[in-house]
Image (cartoon, helix red, strand yellow):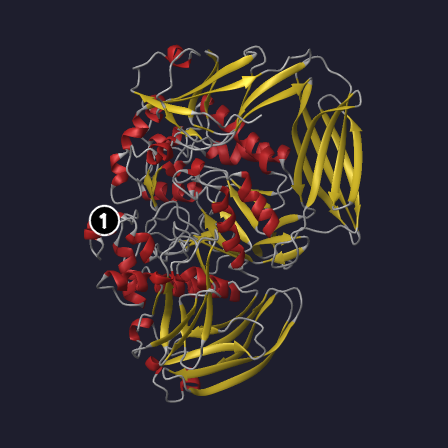
Amino acid sequence: MKINDGWRIHSFDVGAARDLEVAAPEYIDYFWMKAKVPGDVHSTLIARHIIEDPFFGHNDKKCQWVEEKVWWYRTSFQFDEEIAKGEQYELTFEGLDTYATVYLNGVEIGSTENMFMTHTFDVTRELNRGENVLAVKFDPVHVHVKEKLQYYWSGFSKKRIWTRKAQSHFGWDWGPRLVAVGIWKDVHLKKRRHTKLDSICAKTVHIGENEATVEVDIELKGYGKAKEFEVKVFLSDGSEQLVGKATVNGKKAKVALQINNPKLWWTHDLGTPHLYQLTVQLHLDGEVIDRREEEVGIRTIEVLQKDEQGNHCFTFVLNGVKLFAKGANWIPIDSFIGAAPDSRYRHLVKMAKNANMNMLRVWGGGIYEKDVFYQECNRLGLLVWQDFMFACALYPDYNKNFMDNVREEIIHVVKRLRNHPCLAIWCGNNENDWLYEALFSSGEITHPFYGEKIYHELMPELLEELDPTRLFWPSSPFGGNDHNSREQGDSHNWQVWHGNLEPRLFGQTQEVDYSVDGVSFKHFKEDTTKFASEFGMHASSNRYTLESNIPANQFFWGSEEMAYRNKDIHHPKGILLMEGYSGAPTNLAEYIDFSMLTQAEGLKYGIEHYRRNKPSTSGALFWQLNDCWPGTSWSVIDYYLLPKASYHYAKKFFSPILLTIDHHQGEKLDIWVVNERLEDYEDVVELAVYDFTGEKVHAFEQSVLVKANEATCVASFFEADVIRGVDPSQSIIVLSSKTNRTEDNYYYFRDHKDLNLPKAKFFVQVDEEKQEVKIETNAFARMVKIEIDVEKAVISDNFFDLLPNNRVTITINQADGKSIPWDTLKISAINS
């Protein structure tokens, strides 16, 4: 049974209460606060109006007392069963954040120090017939780490390196410090008879032309004398079912299933992400005593590191097909993860799929995500790059207790996640290898590489045993002469935004060009990486998101509250980036527009380059998809799940068939077609030049035939031959399919700041019943923006360029089915 109801919480100063008194069944907790489980303390305090919304203004500073307190949870539950011989009862906490001590009926049954693991306790003898009282004490982090050595390098916080909880809770360059605490996942009481299914590993070991083999490895955990157990394995696809069985040998069993005409699991862009139902039953004397069910996929996944010619590459191969990984980095979806609803996960993963992404990277400073995340990626057909939770720090691998904790964590996480077909790669950490070597070379770090034993000894040893079906990659980035080499492995391009001068080699100091040119997204064109796993630039959140979280008297460009929304300490970077492309903003409206436009055009510029460089480059995962609070960051979807301009651009620059132009101002234009379908693409492509009145000045047509899964340059033009006397500051290029088989692509001869835009006026019709908006303009409109004051608004297209005489119809709804506040509808453009 679940024990999620009836919980109450209360705080104490450290040392102010005797633990056994507070845990005792007779302790009076009637006036404690009611709390939701799963959840956390902060969310409870917000709901009770004890703390103000930490996301509004500077309110996060007002509630930092929460992390200094001891917090207790208490509840009671009824247990009325007779406990028979051979039966045991396990109390399971799927997630405790973090330093917790658990009491049942006044008896201390154990303590925990890892947020990422499930914790299970045998409570057979401690259960009472009738009422039972369950209490959990959470110590503040500082109690456990204040005496720990903290003098060596760690970004954003020193205390976090000893604490196995979400590292970003301590603050990051995109989120505030809010050190959450509480019961963040479900609580269960389960009956066990003699033994249980401890872990199941289902792996595709062979795929032939018309058949496949799936092996299921089963491990048991027993409670006493060994008995004769049998396992039965069922693999179901609708009404079709395969059955296999085996006798348990010791505590292990293996069942092999042969599937005829298997339906493979594919990413959504290559096929259907087909799922089978796997059921494993444990039998004793003909009776089922334990049962597990999971969805699994039949598929193979590998990472090719040398191509057919022996050149370095980093290419994911799914069912024998090379794919270009298109997607983004995923951070925790909320500062308060335990209280985040599953619907938020489903909506975000669906948004990723709708933007033509096929991979998400779970970044190593957050959490191993909730089950719903992986289930949605399985169902929708997105691969997952899975980091282990170590990021931007040295970790105390010299400490046996810490390493024992990490070992248990890795074993638990791998066993928990390895059956998900979406999971494509295990990665040891985020940036630790690269940053250590770079900072050591510059003299900023003088200590040994603490943490190295985790990623280069412990993890590969465990994964060789627990999951040899996937590549283990020690770090991201990694490979080559400099762990951030463009010649081998994966890389993080922080030349753009941070101004890092690349390439560098081992032993060289990392130099930075902190200027308009140094941070420019035009540097993407120089990047020859094999796989770009991080890159990006800031953009403002949507106006509604900002306005809802900034005091009205501070809602202006340059205010202290606006600056507080940006947790990257080098605020001028964004200004430099905009100055180079859109021009620097002078007011809040310009900041929102210019930052969104620059981010969108910058990501487009970089990702189209990476895709044209296929197959030498075989992946582009930008930083970052989502936000954990309503701030200014690299995200393309803000905290209220409102897309920024770059999200709508992503739908187009990640299109399976991409028409793209490679062009530098004053130089020739190369027309490319990127075809990631598994069939040839044959079409007629038009390059048309329009002036800002909407007149098509001239056009060129080109017949194209591009092989399946290839990128090809199909035509080249001198810039002068395309311009033909048209003012380059008052014209636009539209690259399109004459048969409308893919998205139109818009380009300009000059950067935005150098365009001479007309004043555009809109003609709008709104049909509230159909939830449609029709828009026309009298002159070219740059970045048409549709705003409506509601969270999770779903707008079919937004932040698009519109030529006159082109009427567009846009649908607007709300993801949860809530009514649309049509009276707040605003339509504008940069030049309207």
- Residue at figure coordinates x 49%, y 25% from the top left: 405
Name the residue tied to disc 1: 551
In the displayed structure, 789 sits above or below 665; it is above
Marker count (numbered): 1
In the displayed structure, 204 sits above or below 261; it is above
Q: Is residue 292 visible?
A: yes
Relative horizontal placement of residue 294, taking residue 620 as reference (left or right): right
- Residue at figure coordinates x 60%, y 47% from the top left: 378
- Residue at figure coordinates x 63%, y 32% from the top left: 465
Relative horizontal placement of residue 196, taking residue 659 as reference (left or right): right
Image position, residue 714 (x, y; %): 56, 77
Relative horizontal placement of residue 728, taking residue 491 as reference (left or right): left
In the displayed structure, 717 sits above or below 392; it is below
Image position, residue 119 (x, y; %): 52, 24
Q: Nearer the viewer, residue 721 or 805?
A: 805
Q: Residue furthest front?
A: 769
Relative horizontal placement of residue 269, taking residue 97 as reference (left or right): right
Image position, residue 791 (x, y; %): 40, 52
- Residue at figure coordinates x 33%, y 80% from the top left: 729
Type of the residue with mark 1:
Pro
Q: Is residue 517 visible?
A: no
SS under mark 1: loop
Dividing the picture into quadrants, the one containing residue 81 is top right
Image position, residue 701 (x, y; %): 54, 84
Q: Residues within 10 Å of mark 1 (few under 14, many from 20)?
A: some
Looking at the rendered image, the quarter that the N terminus falls into is top right
Q: Nearer the viewer, residue 467 or 281?
A: 281
Dividing the picture into quadrants, the one containing residue 799 is bottom left
Looking at the rendered image, the quarter that the C terminus falls into is bottom left
Q: Nearer the viewer, residue 571 or 828?
A: 828
